[in-house]
Amino acid sequence: MTLPELVIGFMSYYAMYDFNEWHIDVRRKELRNRNEVTTVGYQNEGVRLSIECPVNGKCPTRNVTKECYKAFRKAINHFNSLIWKQVAKEKEKDEFFDAIVNMLGINKKL
């Protein structure tokens, strides 16, 4: 997998991810319904991004402000709209990824 493919996949995944319903548990490599999470120190109310820390089991994202969350969603949605506009323009896979690499300013030699 190339770096552009990884970035595009990450952003596309989180553009479709329902943060209101799911909790990410990195240790278990699975999504859990937020209403079923019983982690010590976790309170579902007001937590916009629910990601459990693999080290201490707490939710480091519990203090994400509403403004920060909105900015995060806006950035992801904007990125994806750029990607899909580029997909519509480019017919060849290599041309598409070259255009994305140039748009992101990623060094292809990485």
Image (tube, grey):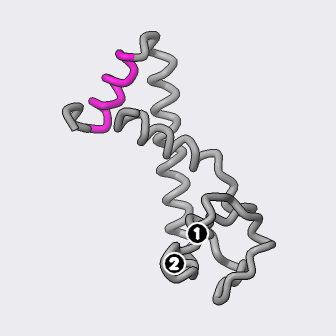
Residue at point 42% right, 16% down?
A: 93
> Which residue is label 1 attached to?
51
Is 104 placed above or below 56 here?
above
Quarter of the image for residue 18 reads: bottom right
Residue type pointed to by label 2: Pro
Circle 1 sits in a helix, a strand or a loop, which is it? Answer: strand
Residue at point 68% right, 59% down?
A: 31
Q: Label 1 to label 2, Cα distance in Å?
A: 7 Å
Residues at circles 1 and 2 in contact by the CB criterion of under 8 Å: yes
Quadrant in which the C terminus is drawn: top left
Q: Position of residue 17 (x, y in %)?
A: 65, 51
Magenta residue span: 94-105
Is 76 placed above or below 70 here?
above
* Labels 1 and 2: the sequence-earlier one: 1
Farthest residue to the right: give it. Answer: 35
State left or right for residue 44 relative to residue 78. Answer: right
Answer whether residue 39 is magenta in the image: no
Circle 2 sits in a helix, a strand or a loop, which is it? Answer: loop
